[in-house]
Each structure stands twice: as structure tokens, then as C-alpha cells.
Image: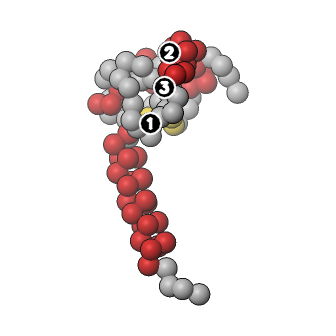
Amino acid sequence: ISRIPEEAVKGAHLVVTDTWASMGQEEEKQEREQAFAGYQVDEAMLDLAADDVLFMHCLPAYRGMEISENLFTDPRSVVFDEAENRLHAQKALMEFLLLKPAI
């Protein structure tokens, strides 16, 4: 465990982050932005990771906050693939729960 982002991503094959303030944390948003300011994931940080690194974010993401402006379009980003796969998994779970035969 490391509190130094550059150290934490060194050689990593997967880098994942999330929004700094979720729904229901609006009152804490400014405080959380200050606390996490040094943890923004950007292209330079991914350059420290493994050559085959993938970047994920569960969305919604605030460009310029937890991720840099251009990270969505970086070839190492699979953010939109992640969102698409989550959608299909959620649909399958709903189908399973709604159509499950009574026991």
C-alpha cells in the first residue's frame, strides 16, 4: 500500500479510479477535491505503469479532476468498454431475477 500515486502505479497492469465525490456527498465535494488533488490520473502517471496498462473508471468522471482532460481518448483507456460491459451484466442480472422460475 502506498500513498504516493507514482509509486503505486509503477509497473501496474491496471489503474482504476473513481469520482472523488459521489451522489450524496455534495457538501463534502470541495473538501474531497482538496484531499485528493494529488491523486489525479493522467497520461504521465500511466507512463510509469506497465507497457500494457489499462485504465478504468466506473463513470461518471469529471475531466480535469480525478482524471486528466485527455485520458478518455488515450489508447490505454477502456472506460467506455467497461461501461458497456457493466450495462450488459446489469441487464442479464435483471432478466435472471425477473424471469427466475418459482421454487
The spot of residue 84 in percent (x, y) is: 35, 51
Residue visible at 38% across and 47% down in the picture: 83
Q: Which SS class for mark 3?
A: helix
In the rendered image of this protein, does residue 92 appear above or below residue 18? below
Return the residue at label 3: 26
| Residue 3 position by quadrant | top right
Q: Residue at left 55%, top 32%?
A: 12
Q: CA distance from mark 3 to mark 2?
A: 8 Å
Q: Is residue 43 visible?
A: no
| Residue corresponding to mark 1 | 57
Q: Hey, what amino acid is under mark 2?
A: Gln
The amino acid type found where label 3 is placed reads Glu
Instruction: Identify the coloring.
Output: secondary structure
Position above or below: 81 against 66: below
Badges 1 and 2: C-beta atoms under 8 Å apart? no
In the figure, residue 36 lies in which quadrant? top right
Label 1 secondary element? strand
Q: Which residue is mark 2?
A: 30
**Residue 78 spot, x, y in % from top left:** 38, 40
Q: In the shown orientation, is residue 59 left or right of residue 16?
A: left
Q: Report x, y in % for residue 49.
A: 51, 27
- Residue sitting at x 49%, y 72%: 97
Does residue 60 appear in this view? yes
Label of residue 27 in the image: none
Q: Of the residues tagged 1 and 2, which is closer to the observer? A: 2
Between 74 and 36, the one lying in front of the other is 36
Residue type (three-letter) at the residue carrying disc 1: His
